[in-house]
Image: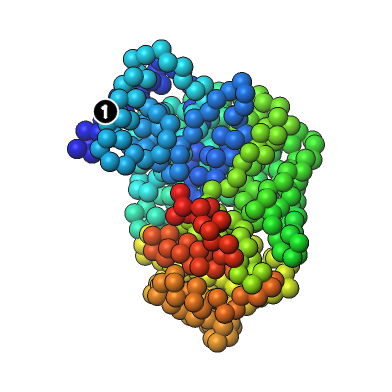
Amino acid sequence: MKRFVRSVFRFLARIILYRAHPIVIAVAGSVGKTATKDAIAAGLAGVARSVRKTEGNFNAEIGVPATIMSAGGAPKGMSQWLSLLWRGVWQAISNRRYPPVLVLELAADHPGDLDPLLSLLRPTIGVLTSAAPEHLEFFGDEATVVEEESLVVRRLPPQGFAVINIDDTRIADMPMTPLVKVISYGWSSTAMIRAVSYSLTNDDHALPDGMVVKISVDGSTIPIALPGVLGRHQVYPLLAAIAVGRALGDDVMSIIQRLSAYTPPPGRMRLFHGRDRSLIIDDTYNASPEAVMAAVHSLHELAIPGQRIAVLGQMSELGAMAAEWHDRIGHEVAQLRIDYLVTVGPLADRIGKAAAASGMPTDRITNVTNAEAAAAVVQPMLAPGVAVLLKGSRFASQLEKAVAILLDNPERDILFLVHGH
């Protein structure tokens, strides 16, 4: 049945693309795809241009053609699937107006996942966020990840635009199709769209409540406010959005003005008021080694009066590299002198043991079995000026449950957590 549905959806999507000729922007990469897709859509959408984007992470073999057929997330139940099919048929045979721009997120969990999606879409703009270690259980090694994720820019047609994160050395010098135009973004001084600096903004209790980022574009330095989030790595989606807008010929200030509507997706370094005037950093959507490292560094860099507490769940689908990567995270936590470490799950226990082996006091390390137990450990430590980072692979750790327990105003904020979407 799944194979039949996939074939029908691909057939209808191909007809729609052939008839409507939208600009197709494909976003792939190991880290930050959803946030980047959302930022690009926000930076392009305006009164004179409608944009359709992937909703949530409906980004694989059925989700991508379904998004082409009709806006919206994954249907639930047979009636919704049939309704989606009917809308796709109607779009394919009617003269109904179609969005001129599609921003589509592409998932690659196994080797070969991207090829059929790119063959269907034939994007003219490809965005590669990174090619970090992920899904190693299926890819085997980092080189295979790079080979797969980079297809989004290596398969572009001549005169297409490759938008790449130049800070990722694995993709910075990647060979492209002749005549493809490369637009680089990042913190590097060589980036065409460059982040220059960022500073944190504070609330009435002197706790961080967002960032102001200075971005250099075409010789001008422009500040952009990013409320409710922190971390250098959270700047990348903004840079990618500006790069795509420039590829389409949009004025920089118009792009930045439209980006004021962008909010990072749930579970990506989102800031909340915790109990007892503490700060909760919700990064619970998922966890790859690179993303965990970035989150822990962001916690370390905070200028706060209280303790820094890291609640880290295990990272999934790392295959034979799982033990090594959990050990590396533990070593990094100790080196950054995080005040207290709570690990969740048996594999995450390696993080704590590695931290202890690297000099972190054992009385400041606790391993628990689930998110609720993690919240029970952390809650007595909450106090004014304390910051708590929560991060782990979602389906292995479900740390959004711990976030909900630690919130100062759960009735208001729970809708902005991962499971609220």
Quadrant the N terminus occupies: top left
For disc 1, the marked residue is: 8
Instruction: Report x, y in % for residue 38.
Output: 55, 40
Residue at (59% x, 35% y) in the render: 42
Along the line of sight, which residue is nearer the eye, 35 or 274?
274
- Residue 317 appears in the rendering: yes
Residue at (59% x, 29% y) in the render: 45
SS for dot 1: helix
Q: Left of 336 or right of it: where is 352?
A: left
Residue 67 higher or lower than 270, as above or below? above
Q: Amino acid at mark 1?
A: Val
Instruction: Report x, y in % for residue 56.
Output: 45, 43
Which residue in the rendered view is the most extreme toward the right?
A: 220
Q: Left of 386 or right of it: where is 267?
A: left
Which residue in the rendered view is the most extreme toward the left?
A: 1
Residue at (37% x, 53% y) in the render: 139
Residue at (43% x, 31% y) in the render: 71
